[in-house]
Image (cartoon, rainbow, N blue to C red):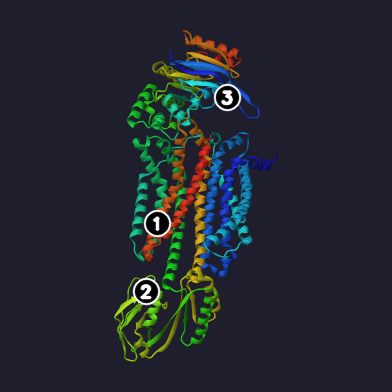
Amino acid sequence: MTFRQFAFNNVLRNKRTYAAYFLSSVFSVMAFFVYAVFAFHPDMSGGTVHRNVQSAMHFAEALIYAFSFFFVLYSMSAFLKTRKKEFGLMVMLGMSDGQLRWMVFLENVLIGFFATVGGIGAGLVMAKLMLLSAENLLGLDETLPFYWPLEAIGLTFVAFLVLFVVISMFTVAILRGNKLIDLLKGSVMPKKEPKASVLQSLIAVALLGAGYAIALTAKGLVVFVVMVPVTLMVIAGTYFLFTQLSVYVIRKTRDNRTVFWRKTNMLFLSDLAYRMKDNARTFFMVAILSTVAFSAIGSLVGFKTMMANDLAGTHPFALEYRALPGREEEAEEDVAEIARTLEEAGYEYEHLRIAMSGQPLADSDASVYTVKATEFNAMAAAAGEQPVELKGDESIFIYYKAMLTNVSPEPKTVTLKGGEELHPKGMRTSTVLPIFNDYYVISDERFDRMTQEAAETFHAFDVDDWKKTKEIGKELEMRFSDSSNRFFSIAYELALVNQQFGITLFIGLFIGAVFFVASGSFLYFRLYADLPDDRAKFGSIKKLGLTDGELKGIVTKQLAILFFVPILVAFVHGVVALTAMQNMFGRSLMSTSLTVLGAFLGIQLVYFLFIRTRYVKEVNPV
Amino acid sequence: MMEMLRVTQLNKIYGGKVPSRALTDINLTIEEGEFVGIMGPSGSGKTTLLNLVAAIDTPTAGEVLLNGKNPHKLSKKELARFRRKELGFVFQDFNLLNTLTVEENIVLPLTLEGERVKTMEEKAATIASKLGIESILKKRTYEISGGQAQRTAIARAMIHSPKFLFADEPTGNLDSKSAKDVMEILTAINRSDRTAMMLVTHDAVAASYCHRVVFIKDGRLFNEIHCGESRQAFFQKIIDVLSLLGGNAHDLSTIRV
């Protein structure tokens, strides 16, 4: 047996011990790789996705890499802790420090190599599945076909080999300081009770409270100004929350005997303080990353809904066609074609038409648009709006309401070139004409009487089943793409918005999912390292008369706290962040965002139940 | 006198590819207030017997009656309650929870039962003064000596005044002075509370505190001797039986009392 064989056999013949570490490594490789498959997707760089989105994706990739690094490092140190005794034995048998380090290094490189290969393999399957689900769930048809991701494979392979080599060096440093006696005693030595500073706990409360208060009270553009300082405050506050405040609160409950000495609370809370302290930094990281994912996803979903709503709100008709002045002939043909296509496809439709007229102003070169009342009323009725009632020379001012403003304009009285005056008797907003400008509705007689300057003609095709006109819309859009007249299909446009946001959203959801599952797995692997201790502990308490139900209860409570505390913190952070954004845009991002966040919590819950069942079984074998 | 423990025709066979017989036809009774030692060479089945009697392990055949109840017939939940009400355990390696203070360790069985804090505090104070550990109640387990740890464990085992106390090598990890203290405490509790006790040990000195010592060899009852007038003479008798057992009596010759 050569030394190298010894190191390799250590791993290969000891699968059970290495399994947790190996699997967590495979997991992080897989997450990174699947993500890389998206980031390097040829269609992503092909222009369908905005350049900013792409650089954001590569930034997120770096973030995942950093996360993987800590993930692997922590799993590795947890794993080495369980092997301290073994190392002690080897030192006793005369292994030199150098040899020990070399052994750990060789083992790690071996595990790292297989983890990388395994992770890429699992990732290929996973990527295919995710692309499929992206197509089906988000309605992204064929935008992201599966491809052979050579770039992603290359990047993942190199990145993780480097990572494992670097981490092996780290572990060598971890082992250096240990005395033989400590190694032999392994993890038997009881840990000191975790301490928390009152001052730092107060700082946590102050930072979080102030951060929240500022974020929630800021309105409009102030939100933008306070964003960075508030974010920093909340990040620092979260750090102290996990490292100090949580431990402090648990210690305080310890002093309250009615709580601490109640049934299984003693067992559950005394352990929790240690677990909190041990995992504080992980919690912090998970909470912050989840907050980022939450807010990003929340605002994306919010934006998407906002855009889709605005689009649908301003376009009440299935198909629209705007003919520019002087292009009426072309328009006649096109409109006939639209009508024919709709008929062929078997749609019932109503063709409505408004001929606008430009009226030059007396005091400037500009002109205002006027619209015939009967034409306007016909279309308003089709759009489900109130008709206007005009007598004689009366007019109504229709103003355009912009997306982000709430100001209503003053109805303007204007004098036209011919000396006539448009003096509106009222004003309102309407979605009938999508010209994004103000105009006047005047009575038919007056319209006919006035000299008309040729202006746009607007054709609308009202179809009851407008949602089904996507294909027709697409077809006609293609056919009219060269025309200078403008064609618009609401169903098709909505599909395009869906598509664009869908991709970004999918990426956001994916990163979010990676962070959640990663944090869950991470905690599980940490738990796995403590499993032998826990098993021994519960074994002896059972002899004192702990029922299986109580044991289950303790384990469940502990796991629930480990699983959900960081995520609940992220949830609260996220809600505050979204409220602030809501204040900035003056729109509600909440309901849709909460659906998404709720879905994440649901996934986490399923994962938690799964882990809990396994852990209870492991810690209390029948 | 009341019979606290009755073991009839107890057998234990460990399964697996090569089944091995750990205990064969064990019959044993322990009366109320009796202090019984179980001795025998390594691998003779002492700990197996203790585990079966305390319902930690299940027998292959035979019956155990603890205070008239068969613990193996109880449901898991009933068994847990039975343990926390009527049984006490002391282990070789103390099995204290090092996340708790000494006092918290002591009251643990009562908290599981949902006892009132006031009652728990009173009981803890009483038992602590009985065992001489009042001064370390607030300390953590890593701050106390082995002897103190074992006294804490005894306090935990006794706080709910169990009818039966099981001790598995309670002196195994202790120096001779601490071992003596622990045995004297157990004897004192046995006398004052009339708790029936079963002590599994290798240590002839510890065994000599018992009223009666039962010897096991290769899973069968080998012999049984009773304490007569003096502990000194009883110790000598124990050593004699051990040498007869082919045990390591000569190892013990240096620690004759």
The image shows residue A222 at horizontal and vertical percentages of: 35, 64
**Do residues under tags 1 and 3 come within 8 Å of each other at their CB atoms?**
no
Q: Quadrant of residue B185?
A: top left
**Do residues under tags 2 and 3 come within 8 Å of each other at their CB atoms?**
no
Rendered residue at 56%/55% (across/down): A32
Question: Quick check: do tags 2 and 1 share a chain?
Answer: yes
Rendered residue at 51%/22% (across/down): B53
Q: Quadrant of the N terminus of chain A?
A: top right
Crowding at label 2, few (<14), some or many (≥20) Cα neighbours within 10 Å? some
Chain of the residue that carries numbered disc 2 in the rendered image: A
Q: Secondary structure at mark 2?
A: loop
Between the C-alphas of marks 2 and 3, the distance is 86 Å
Between the C-alphas of marks 2 and 1, the distance is 36 Å
Between the C-alphas of marks 1 and 3, the distance is 60 Å
Q: Secondary structure at mark 3?
A: loop
Numbered disc in front, either 2 or 3: 2
Q: Indicate which disc, 2 or 1, sits on the residue closer to the N terminus.
A: 2
The residue type indicated by label 2 comes to Glu
The residue type indicated by label 3 comes to Thr
Question: Circle 2 sits on which residue?
Answer: A385
Question: Quick check: do tags 1 and 3 share a chain?
Answer: no
Chain of the residue that carries numbered disc 1 in the rendered image: A
The image shows residue A611 at horizontal and vertical percentages of: 51, 44
Question: Circle 3 sits on which residue?
Answer: B60
Q: Residue A574: tell me if it is visible.
A: yes
The image shows residue A28 at horizontal and vertical percentages of: 56, 51
The image shows residue B168 at horizontal and vertical percentages of: 50, 23
Q: Quadrant of residue A183?
A: top right
Rendered residue at 33%/72% (across/down): A407
Question: Quick check: do tags 2 and 3 share a chain?
Answer: no
Decide which of A397, B257 is in the foreground and name it. Answer: A397
Question: Circle 1 sits on which residue?
Answer: A575
